[in-house]
Amino acid sequence: MMRTSCALGLIVLVLLAGLAYPQDKNKEGQNLSTREMEALKEHAKGTEQMLAKNFKEAIVFFKRALELNPDFSEACYNLGISYEELGKHQDSVEALKRSITLAPDNAHAHYALGYAYYQLKRYKESIDAFERSIALKPNNAFALSKLGHAYLATGNKDKAQEQYNMLKTLNATLAEELNREIAKKEK
């Protein structure tokens, strides 16, 4: 279930990342340099590969984009997602941390970082990342769900129950999934 949820979120976020920069202007409205334009082209190719689920190929394009523009937070983010899809959790963590350094208010990057830490069983760091994601985007049902699971992994059923209570109104399916896990821990 988490794999499907992550993949669906990935597609939406990749599409939104493409909207981050106008064709020939940067975020400050200045004309893009030739290198920035080339980085955008490489990023677009990487995005195409991600959508086709060709994550190894996507990584090549995102790395090229970052060679051309090391401050390209979306390329770092998508590189992290691509690594995560290949099960390269530590590489994912590094790329996502870099993305967050460049764009600290990206709730999706914090969520993805939390997920990568969760996969590495680094639950404290996972909790911190999910909490930051929720602080930036309070109604993120996926982040609330994974935060609840991370709390359960640390043995904190009360905090997991809090997440369940918040999740009930946002996403009944994720809430019930978390509730089943909480019930298993109580046995």
Image (cartoon, rainbow, N blue to C red):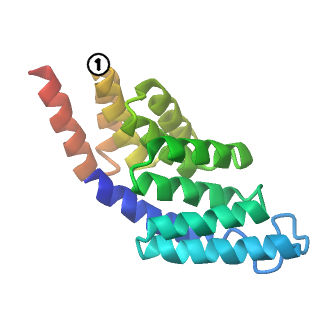
Q: Nearer the viewer, residue 28 or 173?
A: 28
Q: Pinpoint residue 4: horizontal percent, then vertical percent.
A: 30, 60
Can the viewer see residue 138 in this picture? no
Which one is in front, 110 or 177?
A: 110
* Image point (25%, 54%), residue name: 1
Callout 1 secondary element: loop
Please determine whether, in this image, residue 1 is positioned above or below residue 59.
above
Which residue is most to the left? Answer: 187
Residue 19 percent across, percent down from the top left: 65, 73
Q: Position of residue 60 (x, y in %)?
A: 58, 66
**What residue is disc 1 on?**
155
Q: Which residue type carries mark 1?
A: Gly
Instruction: Judge from the rendering whether residue 102 lies leftward or rightward of residue 178; answer left or right.
Output: right
Q: In this image, 136 relative to 41: left or right?
A: left
- Asked if 23 appears above or below 186 in the picture, the reply is below
Quarter of the rendering occupied by the C terminus: top left
Image quarter for residue 34?
bottom right
Label 1 Cα neighbours within 10 Å, binned few <14 / some 14-19 / many ≥20: few
Q: Nearer the viewer, residue 126 or 138?
A: 126
Q: Residue at x 79, y 76 (%)?
A: 37
Q: Residue at x 14, y 21 (%)?
A: 186
Vertical placement of residue 100 versus 43, above or below:
above
**Left or right of 71, for residue 124:** left
Can see residue 63? yes
Relative image position of residue 5 (x, y in whole percent): 34, 57
